[in-house]
Image: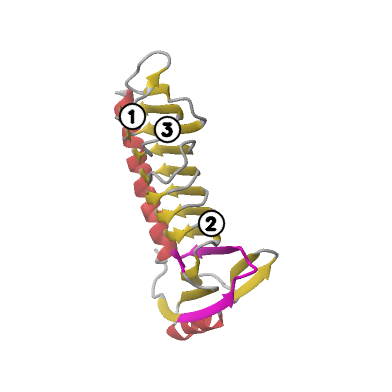
Amino acid sequence: MKRNLALLLPAGLALTVIIVVGGCCINFGWWNQQQHERTEQVSAPIDQARQISVDTSFGDITIIGADTNDCNVIAKITGQAPSTEEAKSLAEQTKIKLEPDGNTLIIRAEKPHLSRKRSVSITYDIVVPTRTSVKCKSSYGKIKLANIRGVVSANTSFGNIEAENITGRMDLDTSYGKVDCQKISCAEFLANSSFGDIEVDFTNACPNNLISRITTSYGNVEADVPTDFTGDVVIETSFGKVRTELPIMIKGDVSKTRLTGTIGQGNGKLNFKTSFGSVNIE
């Protein structure tokens, strides 16, 4: 009985979150709100700036690596206000700036003063050189990353994180969302979600001493580990099952909810944990 109550808890919380997110994104309870959208495109050389930093309160972020020497930004700016004229004014007053700061190129939005029942949301589509490191954050929005060879740090409070073809160190965090990563070839991978599944496909291009820590409170963990990985393995769940096809030399007692052991003699570390969910490692 206690377990059933625990499993029902996240569902109730998730429903509350959906209402809260809806209230923030579409002005739930704000009657007669009007919107105006416009697009702004800016670019700047990034030869000397090895990292970009972008932050948005409301909106998605997509960052793609490509064969270019510039940082190219397309921002969709949406103003919301009681009247169409005011919504348009808020959108048009918002400007996107690219500002160098040491080795970082900061993507920043200059917004007008926002009084009650007025808001501005910004969604970014960004193209950068493949070797660029990325630091990005959204409070309410999803994050998508692809073809990046630099270090990646991505954080969103309410939204999914998707990544593909990343070779630099990765640190991903979402409070309410799923983490889905494909074709990952990095040496260190960290991912956390409070409410959401985490799926990672590591390629065999990863070093055999891969270090990975994956944690979710309410969700499943699925990982495809490089075939030549060697090192320590810790897999655990509080309410769920542990499944693996890896040739692990077990240490200690065997349990349905926890597995500790080693593969070979290497220095790699795999630590996969969920509280309410299953762990499947191949």
Q: Which residue position holds label 1?
A: 246
Q: CA distance from mark 1 to mark 3?
A: 16 Å
Given the image, on which type of amino acid does mark 3 rest?
A: Lys
229 relative to 107, above or below: above
Q: Earlier in the sequence, mark 2 or mark 1?
A: 2
Secondary structure at numbered mark 3: strand
Return the mark for residue 273.
3
Q: CA distance from mark 2 to mark 3?
A: 26 Å
Secondary structure at numbered mark 1: loop
Nearer the viewer's eye, disc 2 or disc 3? 2
Q: Which residue position holds label 2?
A: 150
Magenta highlight range: 39-66
CB of mark 1 within 8 Å of CB of mark 3? no
Q: Main secondary structure of the magenta part?
A: strand
- Crowd rating for badge 1 (residues with CA inside 10 Å; few <14, some 14–19, many 20+): some
Q: Position of residue 33 (x, y in %)?
A: 41, 75
